[in-house]
Amino acid sequence: MSSASQKSPDAYTEAGLFVAFMQIADILGAQAEQVIKTAGLTGAQYNVLRILRGAGRAGLACREIGERMISRDPDITRLLDRMEKRNLITRERQSDDRRVVKTYVTPEGLQLLKTLDRPVSALHERQFQGIAPAKLKVLAAMLEEVRSQHAGQKADCDLRGRALNKSKKKDSKQKRASKIAP
């Protein structure tokens, strides 16, 4: 077996961490969905309401909401449409720039969030009970470091581990050059 196909011990650790992150996110997310569902919301709707509550009176444009979402929603406009129909949010076209539509949480949306604040907080306490506060702080710092390193990034390799962006750009440049060359 060639040395290129052998995995280093670090690769096994990294793969194990990835699987653990995905499993933990699934478990904790499912628990949160159960609590949020009691208020008639999806996780994405709850996330939007929290984002808008944090934005305050300034509101946010659709793109800004999408950038702050925990899980990216490819159709944020339809999500906002459904929430507007339920009177959880309102949208206003800006007079200084007609291209911009700001979204705001309504009093009804704020009230719904308020009813979930205690149950969600209690859930988080249960989810992390038994872990010392000092360890939770270290874990939070480590996870933030990982998240910030990868925020906004897309996959950079294919199934064989080859670089996506670099090889595609190089291939297209070579093809153009071969068409120009005599």
Image (cartoon, rainbow, N blue to C red):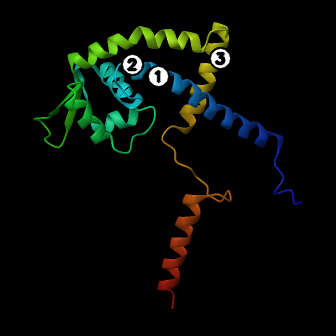
Residue drawn 67% across the image and 56% down it: 161
Q: Residue furthest left?
A: 95
Q: Nearer the viewer, residue 38 or 22?
A: 38
Find residue 98 and report its image quarter: top left
Residue drawn 38% across the image and 45% down it: 74
Label 2: which residue? 38
Q: Are marks 2 and 1 in contact (CB under 8 Å)?
A: yes
> Type of residue at label 3?
Val
Mark 2 vs mark 1, CA separation in Å: 7 Å
SS for tag 1? helix
Residue 37 image offset from top left, x and y in percent: 40, 23
Mark 1 vs mark 3, CA separation in Å: 28 Å
Residue 157 image offset from top left, x and y in percent: 61, 55
> Type of residue at label 1?
Gln
Q: Residue furthest bottom?
A: 182
Mark 2 vs mark 3, CA separation in Å: 32 Å
Q: Is residue 67 above or below residue 120?
A: below
Callout 2 environment at 10 Å: few (<14), some (14 to 19), or many (20+)?
few
- From the image, state whether disc 1 or disc 3 is nearer to you: 1
Residue drawn 65% across the image and 57% down it: 159
Q: Is residue 3 above or below residue 37?
A: below
Residue drawn 81% across the image and 57% down it: 4
Q: Nearer the viewer, residue 52 or 25?
A: 25
Callout 1 environment at 10 Å: few (<14), some (14 to 19), or many (20+)?
few
Image position of 172 (left or right of 36)? right
Label 1: which residue? 34
Image quadrant where one finds the N terminus: bottom right
> Type of residue at label 2?
Thr
